[in-house]
Amino acid sequence: MIFSNFSLVIYLPSYLLFSYFCYLVFTMLIYVK
């Protein structure tokens, strides 16, 4: 249980960061276009 929580704590922020990065790239492309 503890290990699973730890992996979730590690996985969630990285996923949020990745989605945020994708969002930035997407808006950048739209802005340039």
Image (cartoon, helix red, strand yellow):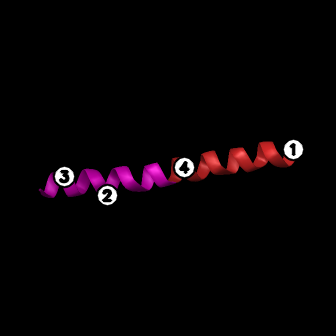
> Is label 2 in a helix, a strand or a loop?
helix
Q: CA distance from mark 4 to mark 1?
A: 20 Å
Tag 4: amino acid:
Ser
Q: Residue 15, how many percent across, how many down?
A: 45, 49
> Is label 3 in a helix, a strand or a loop?
helix
Q: Residue 30, how many percent across, how many down?
A: 80, 46
Residue at the image position 26 percent from the left and 50 percent from the top:
7
Residue at the image position 87 percent from the left and 44 percent from the top:
32
Image mark for residue 32: 1
Q: CA distance from mark 3 to mark 2?
A: 9 Å
The quadrant in which the N terminus is found is: bottom left
Q: CA distance from mark 2 to mark 1?
A: 35 Å
Q: Quadrant of residue 5?
A: bottom left
User: Which mark sits nearer the N-terminus, 3 or 1?
Assistant: 3
State yes or no: residue 13 in magenta: yes
Residue at the image position 74 percent from the left and 50 percent from the top:
27
